[in-house]
Image: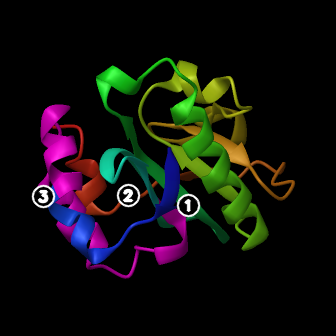
Amino acid sequence: MTIRNIKESDQENIKALLKDFNMNEEYFDILYNSSYYIDDLSFVLEDDLEIVGFMMLTRNKLGKAEGLTLAPLLVEKRYQHKGLGKHLLKRGLNVASALGYEYIVALGNDAFYEKYNFLPAENFGVVGTGVILSLNHMDEELNCEIKYPRAIKNLFK
């Protein structure tokens, strides 16, 4: 298994994976070609040169805090429950922290993310869907609403 950054040639395989999960595959094109996309924070999981998982961390803001949205993190069903999602997540967390981002808002399976110290958004005074991990001691109450790009809002339709 290999974790590497997304390449332009991966796009069709990633969209096929999104489709397998009944997710809006067009969201990838929108984010990939937007100012929210960050090359260093988008990864694929490969097995013998086949993409079997991927994750994207894209820019967002909560009040004045600079952070990221994690959506989605997917691993093909035949590769699930082997710790591969955890490895993708840890790679993203390490790089995001090293780049100085203040927090990550994760969308998806809250129970999965809570195992890795993500907390409900309301713990930070944030209104909206998702769980949040503070990367750089963001412990003050933000009293704001999460605002997602349209592509992320449509991701789970």
Q: Amino acid at mark 3?
A: Glu
The verdict on residue 30 being magenta is yes
Q: Amino acid at mark 1?
A: Leu
Residue annotated with mark 2: 148
Instruction: Name the chief secondary structure element in magenta.
Output: helix
Q: Is residue 83 left or right of residue 59?
A: right
Disc 3 and disc 1: Cα gap in Å? Answer: 20 Å
Q: Residue at x 23, y 38 (%)?
A: 156
Question: In this picture, which residue range is highlighted in magenta?
Answer: 13-42
Q: Nearer the viewer, residue 55 or 108?
A: 55
Look at the numbered disc 2 and give the secondary structure of its residue: loop
Q: Is residue 21 left or right of residue 147?
A: left
Q: Residues within 10 Å of mark 1 (few under 14, many from 20)?
A: many
Look at the numbered disc 1 and give the secondary structure of its residue: strand
Residue 26, label in figure: 3
Q: Residues within 10 Å of mark 3 (few under 14, many from 20)?
A: some
Residue that lies at the very extreme toward the front in this rendered image: 48
Q: How many marks?
A: 3
The verdict on residue 73 being magenta is no
Is residue 127 in view from this perspective?
yes
Q: Residues within 10 Å of mark 2 (few under 14, many from 20)?
A: some
Look at the numbered disc 3 and give the secondary structure of its residue: helix
Q: Quadrant of the C terminus?
A: top left
The coloring applied to the image is rainbow
Q: Amino acid at mark 2?
A: Tyr
Residue 153, label in figure: none
Residue annotated with mark 1: 68
